[in-house]
């Protein structure tokens, strides 16, 4: 199924959770933050949140900045 | 303050901000360093306790990279809202940063102008008002303007962060006179942010009575960022001590430093 991650369409397996997606992509969990269809998704809900076709995800981390 | 400043100890001259007593009056931005790896050395040399960073989409080429992994545990995190063009976008970024476990401090940065990156004071005020209501410690980056600073104070900003010159320009305190007015008229800490390019300019801001300075580009783009961080640490302490010591009056004409009771012209 297709979802949109950080503005780009991506094909993922059905029943994939947010947790699995981040783990598969190698994202460091510490201080990563996820917006799921425009709502902040707390880290404790990543494992219990299955992705649905058409979902929009923003996966954000902290970079250097002034 | 102690009776004499001869043995100035910054740890006895702390800056109270957001319920915390800060020993260091030098805040550091983490952008533009050649690599994140140098940041721990820079922070150590600077003595800084407050560090800014930005929230961005994860880089898929480097998904493990995260500036937080380079910061010591006791660092006070000050995420900025860079990239925001409106108050709503700044509020969204602040909430995300908080959800990421970065505490409740936030530097509001709302910019629409792409050439000079000048902050939008109106949107900044709107974002500040809302985020204070949500319990954030809000430090708004702003164009130095007394009216706006007063309103930011009224809505509960923790400090005011006027720019010295455009972000990343290293041009120093071009807005010096406007900052002087803010220091004089606003009871909140004034933290000069943006544009400070040399240690002497940081010292100047502190000497004027700024509560702290935020420096990024000047350190990150220096030939030796670690040494420059140390130079800024010394400059901030020197400027602060100069302010506390109370500079003497300025005059247009000379007043002799040596006694005028000379002997050469005497008969």
Image (tube, grey):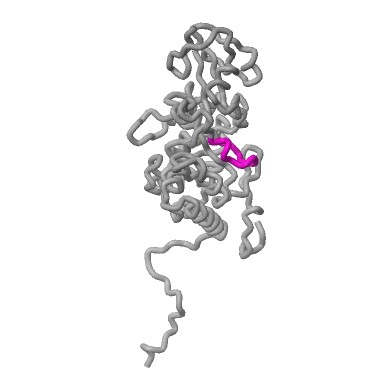
Quarter holding the N terminus of chain B is: bottom right
Judge whether residue B95 can be spotted in this image. Answer: no
Q: Residue at x 65, y 41 (%)?
A: B74
Q: Is residue B69 magenta?
A: yes
Q: Is B127 drawn above or below residue B256 in the view shown? A: above
Q: Nearer the viewer, residue A41 or B5?
A: A41
Q: Position of residue B100 (x, y in %)?
A: 59, 27
The residue at the point 47 percent across, 28 percent down is B59
Quadrant including the C terminus of chain B: bottom left
Res B220 → quadrant:
top left
Task: Left or right? Give the position of A10 relative to A29.
Answer: left
Considering every residue shown, the one lying at the far bottom of the view is: B267
Does residue B249 appear to the left or right of B76 in the view shown?
left
Residue at 48 percent of width and 21 percent of height? B88
Q: Is residue B88 visible?
A: yes
The structure residue drawn at horizontal position 40% and vertical position 40%, both measured from the top left corner, is B167
Q: Nearer the viewer, residue A52 or B31?
A: A52
B126 and A22: which is toward the camera = A22
Relative image position of residue B154 (x, y in whole percent): 55, 32
Provide residue B174's location: percent of width, then percent of height: 38, 47
**Is the residue B129 above or below the residue B32 in the image?**
above
Q: Quadrant of residue B19?
A: top right
The picture places residue A56, in percent across and down from the top left corner, at 49, 13
Residue B2 lies in the magenta stretch: no
Magenta segment range? B67-78
């Amino acid at each position: 199924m297709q979802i949109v991650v950080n503005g780009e369409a991506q094909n993922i397996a059905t029943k994939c959770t947010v947790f699995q997606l981040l783990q598969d992509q190698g994202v460091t969990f510490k201080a990563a933050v996820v917006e799921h269809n425009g709502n902040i998704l707390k880290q404790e809900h990543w494992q219990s949140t299955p992705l649905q076709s058409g979902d929009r995800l923003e996966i954000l981390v902290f970079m250097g900045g002034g | 303050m102690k009776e004499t400043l001869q043995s100035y100890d910054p740890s006895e001259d702390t800056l109270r901000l957001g319920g915390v007593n800060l020993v260091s009056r030098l805040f550091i931005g983490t952008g533009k360093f050649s690599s994140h790896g140098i940041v721990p050395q820079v922070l150590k040399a600077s003595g800084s306790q407050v560090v800014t960073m930005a929230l961005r989409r994860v880089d898929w080429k480097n998904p493990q990279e995260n500036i937080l992994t380079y910061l010591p545990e006791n660092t006070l995190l000050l995420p900025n809202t860079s990239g925001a063009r409106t108050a709503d976008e700044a509020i969204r970024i602040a909430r995300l940063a908080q959800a990421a476990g970065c505490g409740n401090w936030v530097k509001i940065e709302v910019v629409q102008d792409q050439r000079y990156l000048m902050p939008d004071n109106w949107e900044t005020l709107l974002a500040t008002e809302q985020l204070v209501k949500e319990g954030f410690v809000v430090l708004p980056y702003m164009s130095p303007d007394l009216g706006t600073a007063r309103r930011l104070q009224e809505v509960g900003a923790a400090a005011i962060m006027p720019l010295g010159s455009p972000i990343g320009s290293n041009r120093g305190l071009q807005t010096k006179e406007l900052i002087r007015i803010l220091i004089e008229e606003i009871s909140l800490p004034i933290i000069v942010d943006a544009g400070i390019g040399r240690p002497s300019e940081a010292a100047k801001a502190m000497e004027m009575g700024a509560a702290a300075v935020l420096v990024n580009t000047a350190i990150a783009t220096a030939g030796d960022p670690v040494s420059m961080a140390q130079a800024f640490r010394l400059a901030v302490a020197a400027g602060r001590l100069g302010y506390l010591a109370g500079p003497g009056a300025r005059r247009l004409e000379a007043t002799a430093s040596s006694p005028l009771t000379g002997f050469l012209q005497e008969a």
